[in-house]
Image (cartoon, grey):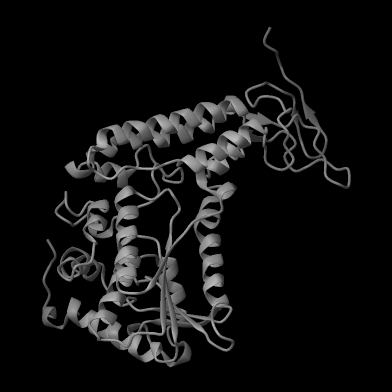
Amino acid sequence: MRTLSLFEDQRLTLQGAIAQSAENLRHYGQFYKHWAIAFSGGKDSTATATLVLHLIKTGQIPKPESLTLLYADTRQELPPLHFSALRVLDFAKELGFDARVVLPEIDKRFWVYILGRGVPPPNNGTLRWCTRQIKVDPMTQALADVRSQLDEGDRLLMLTGVRLGESAARDQRIAVSCTKDGGECGQGWFQSMTADRTDTLAPILHWRVCHVWDWLNFEAPFEGYPTEMVAEAYGMVESDGEEALSMRTGCVGCPLVSGNEDDALARLIKNPNWAYLAPLQRVRSLHRQMRDFRHRLRKDGSERKADGSLVKNPGRVGPLTLEARSHFLEQVLAIQDEVNALAGDRPHVSLINDEEEARIRKLIALKTFPDKWDGSEPNGAELLPEVYQDGSVQNLLFTLA
């Protein structure tokens, strides 16, 4: 239970927060004919997208000449977030706005990159390739496409769901830039020239997390916006709300999450509406298995640079074997089939769609490997002498007969 204070009557209400957001948008929006909203389907970006649509629809802010909603579909989001995002796009289209799904190119999608090309699942060390490849780069290209349609001299105002309190590092960046261009934090975080011909505004910067949930749970649904699934994805339905207020979500079976359990998914399947997603919990186990050396290739210690010197790690372990990739493809598809068999009339999931499956099988058949690998390397579980960058060798103390 939240502790009340002597200043309770001075606490910013949701209606006050909405009024400030509307004022931000009226002030900055008047200088731009073209707006874009880049959203991920999470709580803050969904709140931003639906709020802007609502304020335009109700005439509280002027309608720009164009508004483009861009949904970053990583193909890995929790199903309720994905389905909710698609419904928000449909709602925007009904209002006459441009709404697009932004996808990575086929060979860079999560499962195609792993199972088709053989790149191991990302980790928190030197192989964190996922966020930029399946989310940031496609969105950057989509925004460039939007800008390419503008008349010469026009600039794009990009609206984001950045909000104080979500990240200490982000809060620090905001704190040192909040007086830029004469703006203050309470007026939204405005940044000029964040990209070519693009300026950025965070209209809900000042919203507390309780404002976000009040909007998504009550105000937005009352106005007809499809945001209930977002609350379900964060566990707001099955809890008293205290923990879920600050709950974070990630990809299905995210390999970057520490611990043995995907907390976001575990919380979600407690909701009877989403209990059928329980087989998705096995995805994290597949990621761990893929890191096992017996499913991967390794260098034999002889790899050299162009100048003839040894590479930094001559015996490094690398991509998945062709056999492992075929095996894990069937495992992922089996999980997908199991979930959809349990779904009934609930939304079906698509971990790997038909196009991606066909591409994965083709890349395996073509014996595709990452650069500097060709499949002839030893198995990662094979015991080999340890070769160091200076050329010294630690021979095996014993060999298996």
Name the residue located 70 percent from the left edge and 13 percent from the top edge.
399
Q: Is residue 4 above or below residue 342?
A: below
Total residue callouts:
0
Q: Position of residue 228 (x, y in %)?
A: 21, 58
Task: Give the side of residue 84 with respect to residue 256, left or right.
Answer: left
Q: Position of residue 65 (x, y in %)?
A: 41, 85
**Residue 271 seen from this side:** no
Q: Position of residue 287 (x, y in %)?
A: 47, 36
Task: Give the side of residue 228 with respect to residue 172, left or right.
Answer: left
Name the residue located 53 percent from the left edge and 48 percent from the top edge.
109
**Residue 141 seen from this side:** yes
Task: Give the side of residue 390 with respect to residue 215, left or right.
Answer: right
Name the residue located 72 percent from the left edge and 39 percent from the top edge.
313
Front-lying residue, 71 or 215: 71
* Screen quadrant of the N terminus: bottom left
Q: Is residue 7 above or below residue 90?
A: below
Report which quarter residue 257 is drawn in. top left
Residue projecting furthest to the top: 401
Report which quarter residue 59 is drawn in. bottom left
Front-lying residue, 233 or 365: 365
* Screen quadrant of the C terminus: top right
Q: Position of residue 168 (x, y in %)?
A: 40, 66
Q: Is residue 244 above or below residue 273?
A: below
